[in-house]
């Protein structure tokens, strides 16, 4: 089976991890700091906080934004459930708005139509690696005093109008799960441009511990003293995994280049095929392609999915509209709310996309698509 996504691990990655295992710091050490600094450098953020997953990154980002009971979070249904469920965990009320037809990203006009003074965060997702339209969303967020969050689980390494993902929104979250663009096995990070949000994110992921004497309520307690002001969790990424992340980060440019080649080969090999619609790239972005989201028309997605799976092609579907999950159904969300997202879901089929795919494998996938839709 050709997997739809997988990691690329080389000897440098293995050595980087082994070196940390032989050293003094398995966690809370210098490799974590080095990884966070390198992430900030790459993403143009002023601060990055590494965490144990992309889901943790979202939880930390919403907590840093101060999301709590009574607050509204406006987001897209075309994402992994964690974009919304991690805000529910903090007591937020989620409003789902529809997506744009070309990119499957959150539609700024739809956001504009629903936001209010209760909106604390507007959370977009760079679906497949294609950045959200930040310049259209920013004035909407500013108008109601909301923060902009970019779930960049798909898009570390992408740029929008020449600016890197990580330097666009108030808070940006990354995932380093093995199928993503780079990996630390499990892992994630929060990037921000705002020192106060960075401090809050760091504290929440570190059990809420305050160790800065200037901020302590009881600064004269003693040299051992640390204190907690607000609830936090332990979401620390260990140095062992940060070493893998740091080593992978050095390879991100090469991963992006190979993913672009695979994308271009699909675009060329599938051009003009009846019964499918190919993904598009807007002129002002340079995405790292995490997914290749083909659209299968005429109600034939399931049939094409089954045919390709039996041909040994590990296709996937990304995503079930979030409010179709029983968790959200049980909260009262009803089908039909976001027709573009539901139509997109009905047609979407993710073809294999990762840096280790060979041209021969890509051609094998293209042939399988042609057979499946032609037959
Ligand atoms: C993968 C993913 C997440 C969650 O990341 P994990 O590291 O798997 O917890 C969140 N949002 C999106 C869009 C994702 O693709």
Image: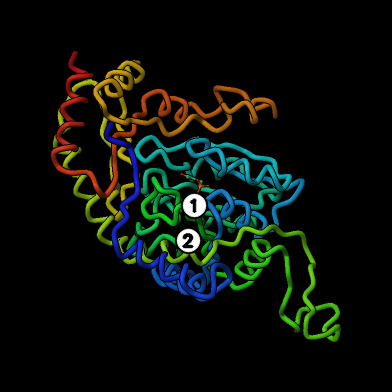
Query: Residue 67, percent across and down?
Result: 70, 53
Query: Which residue corresponds to the image point at 43% horizontal and 27% vertical from the top-left?
Result: 345
**Circle 2 sits on which residue?**
241
| SS for callout 1 | loop
Q: Position of residue 82 (x, y in %)?
A: 57, 42
State yes or no: discs 2 and 1 in contact (Cβ < 8 Å). yes
Q: Is label 1 within 8 A of ligand 1 (CB to nearest ligand atom)?
A: yes
Residue 50 to residue 369: above or below: below
Residue drawn at point x = 75 percent, y = 83 percent? 213
Q: Nearer the viewer, residue 192 or 364?
A: 364
User: Residue, x 34% and y 60% (percent of image)?
Assistant: 161
Q: Which residue is mark 1?
A: 186
Mark 2 residue crowding within 10 angstroms, few (<14) / some (14–19) / many (20+): many
Question: In front: 95, or 316?
Answer: 316
Quarter of the figure with the C terminus: top left
Q: Residues within 10 Å of mark 1 (few under 14, many from 20)?
A: some
Residue 32 position (above or below residue 65): below
Q: How is the image coloured?
A: rainbow
Q: Position of residue 229 (x, y in %)?
A: 80, 67
Classify mark 2: helix, strand or loop: helix
Q: Nearer the viewer, residue 350 or 118?
A: 350
The quarter in which the N terminus is drawn is: top left
User: Looking at the picture, does residue 319 appear above or below residue 281?
Assistant: above
Could you tell me how far apart the alpha carbons at marks 2 and 1 are, in whole angstroms?
Answer: 8 Å
Q: Residue furthest top?
A: 375
In which image quadrant can residue 38 be found? bottom left
| For marks 2 and 1 on the same chain, the one whose residue lies earlier in the sequence | 1
């Amino acid at each position: 089976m050709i997997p739809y996504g997988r990691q690329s691990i080389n000897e440098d990655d293995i050595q980087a991890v082994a070196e940390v295992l032989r050293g003094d710091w398995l966690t809370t050490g210098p490799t974590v700091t080095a990884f966070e600094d390198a992430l900030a450098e790459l993403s143009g953020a002023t601060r990055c906080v590494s965490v144990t997953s992309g889901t943790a990154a979202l939880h930390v980002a919403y907590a840093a934004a101060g999301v709590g009971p009574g607050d509204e979070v406006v987001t897209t249904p075309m994402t992994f459930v964690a974009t919304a469920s991690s805000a529910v965990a903090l007591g937020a009320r989620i409003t789902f708005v529809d997506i744009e037809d070309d990119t499957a990203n959150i539609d700024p006009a739809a956001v504009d139509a629903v936001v209010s003074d209760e909106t604390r965060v507007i959370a977009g997702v760079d679906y497949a690696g294609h950045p959200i339209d930040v310049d259209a969303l920013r004035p909407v967020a500013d108008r109601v005093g909301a923060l902009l969050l970019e779930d960049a689980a798909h898009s570390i390494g992408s740029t929008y109008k020449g600016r890197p993902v990580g330097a666009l929104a108030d808070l940006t979250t990354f995932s380093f799960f093995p199928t993503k663009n780079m990996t630390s096995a499990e892992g994630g990070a929060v990037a921000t441009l705002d020192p106060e949000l960075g401090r809050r994110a760091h504290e929440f992921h570190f059990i809420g511990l305050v160790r800065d004497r200037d901020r302590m309520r009881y600064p004269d307690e003693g040299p051992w003293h640390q204190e907690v002001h607000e609830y936090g969790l332990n979401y620390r990424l260990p140095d062992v995994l940060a070493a893998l992340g740091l080593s992978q980060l050095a390879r991100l440019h090469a991963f992006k280049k190979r993913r672009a080649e695979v994308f271009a080969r699909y675009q060329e090999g599938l051009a003009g095929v009846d019964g499918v619609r190919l993904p598009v790239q807007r002129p002002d972005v340079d995405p790292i392609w995490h997914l290749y989201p083909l659209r299968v028309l005429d109600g034939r997605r399931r049939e094409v999915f089954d045919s390709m799976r039996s041909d040994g092609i590990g296709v996937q579907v990304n995503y079930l509209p979030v409010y179709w999950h029983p968790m959200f159904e049980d909260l009262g969300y009803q089908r039909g709310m976001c027709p573009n997202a539901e139509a997109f879901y009905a047609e979407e089929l993710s073809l294999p996309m990762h840096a280790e795919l060979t041209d021969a494998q890509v051609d094998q996938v293209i042939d399988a698509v042609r057979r499946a839709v032609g037959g």
